[in-house]
């Protein structure tokens, strides 16, 4: 059974493109004044959720929220829906959101992630030193050091590399098997809304995760989702 799953994971579905729209952002509620014990002014929740009414856990393994270092345990791992973290605080900061998938061989992208592609065009040995050490023990650097990231992926994935070596590199190359989003936590109103002194603020964005030529295993997961809720499914912000 394990061998069959591995074959499904390594085989691709050519000519197929599956797009999974998502919504991510935060909602913040103002306390009305600073909290005496810690000076916090807001309660907030940062989240990732499907745009359509479907259970993302069919293909999402986990979601990693990287909070500001001032928080106890800033790395929050959510293994099942709802993919969200609730905290209190007084300041705005960038939250890094990483979405991991059940198939470690899948390489989806988001529109925003594609915009950062230039950062990923460096040779693999400059990105992942640990992976370089493993590869150096099996292949000369000249085999891969001057080729693109995509070509490097094809190189080690389809050459005569042992299954153990592939698994080691897959674990190290987390940049290959995740989608990364960046969200600025928003607590305070700006512009005309600031005058209204609203107590609740919503900062929400639409994004699409693109699976181009997914593996057979991932294709099955992406097309086998169920409804997350039997009620009305809507978003706080019109993302259409």
Image: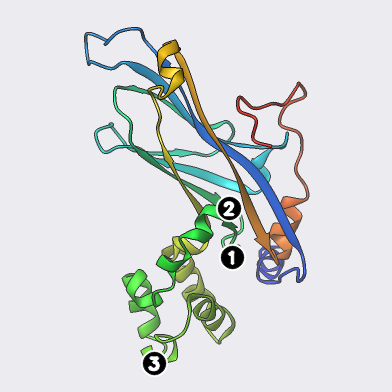
Near mark 3 (Cα within 10 A), the count class, few <14, some 14-19 or many ≥20, is: few
* First in sequence: mark 3 vs mark 1: 1
Query: Which residue is identified by label 2?
Result: 101
Q: Residues within 10 Å of mark 2 (few under 14, many from 20)?
A: many
| Residue beneath the point at 41% across and 18% down | 194
Residue at screen point 71% across, 71% down: 11
Disc 2 is placed on an element classified as strand
Q: Position of residue 84 (x, y in %)?
A: 50, 31
The residue positioned 69% from the left and 37% from the top of the image is 240
Q: Which colour scheme is used?
A: rainbow
Q: Are marks 3 and 1 in contact (CB under 8 Å)?
A: no
Residue at (36, 10) in percent of width and height: 31
Q: Callout 3: helix, strand or loop? A: helix
Is residue 118 left or right of 7 when viewed as pictured? left
Q: Quadrant of residue 95?
A: top left
Residue nearest the viewer, comparing 235 with 106: 235
Residue that badge 1 annotates? 105
Quadrant containing the N terminus in the rendered view: bottom right
Task: Say whether residue 135 is left or right of residue 148.
Answer: left
Q: Is residue 43 above or below residue 228?
A: above
**Mark 3 or mark 2, which has the lower sequence index?**
2
The residue that label 3 is drawn on is 142
Confirm or deny contact between disc 2 and disc 1 (CB under 8 A): no
On screen, residue 107 above or below 203? below
Between the residue at mark 2 and the residue at mark 1, the CA separation in whole angstroms equals: 9 Å
Q: Position of residue 57 (x, y in %)?
A: 64, 42
- The image shows residue 38, relative to residue 112, as above or below, that is above
């Amino acid at each position: 059974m394990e061998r069959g799953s591995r074959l499904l994971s390594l085989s691709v579905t050519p000519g197929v493109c599956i797009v999974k729209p998502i919504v991510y952002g935060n909602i913040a509620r103002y306390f009305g004044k600073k909290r005496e014990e810690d000076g916090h002014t807001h309660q907030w929740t940062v989240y990732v959720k499907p745009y359509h009414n479907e259970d993302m856990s069919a293909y999402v393994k986990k979601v990693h929220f990287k909070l500001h270092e001032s928080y106890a345990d800033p790395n929050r791992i959510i293994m099942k829906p709802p993919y969200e973290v609730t905290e209190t605080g007084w300041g705005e900061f960038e939250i890094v959101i990483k979405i991991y998938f059940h198939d470690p061989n899948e390489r989806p992208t988001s529109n925003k992630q594609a915009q950062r592609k230039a950062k990923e065009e460096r040779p693999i040995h400059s990105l992942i030193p640990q992976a370089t050490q493993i590869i150096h023990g099996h292949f000369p650097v000249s085999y891969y050091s001057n080729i693109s990231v995509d070509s490097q992926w094809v190189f080690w994935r389809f050459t005569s590399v042992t299954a153990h070596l592939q698994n080691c590199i897959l674990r190290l190359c987390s940049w290959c098997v995740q989608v990364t989003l960046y969200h600025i936590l928003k607590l305070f109103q700006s512009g005309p809304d600031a005058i209204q002194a609203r107590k609740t603020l919503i900062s929400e964005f639409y994004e699409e995760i693109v699976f181009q030529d997914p593996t057979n295993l991932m294709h099955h997961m992406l097309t086998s989702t169920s409804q997350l809720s039997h009620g009305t499914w809507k978003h706080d912000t019109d993302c259409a």
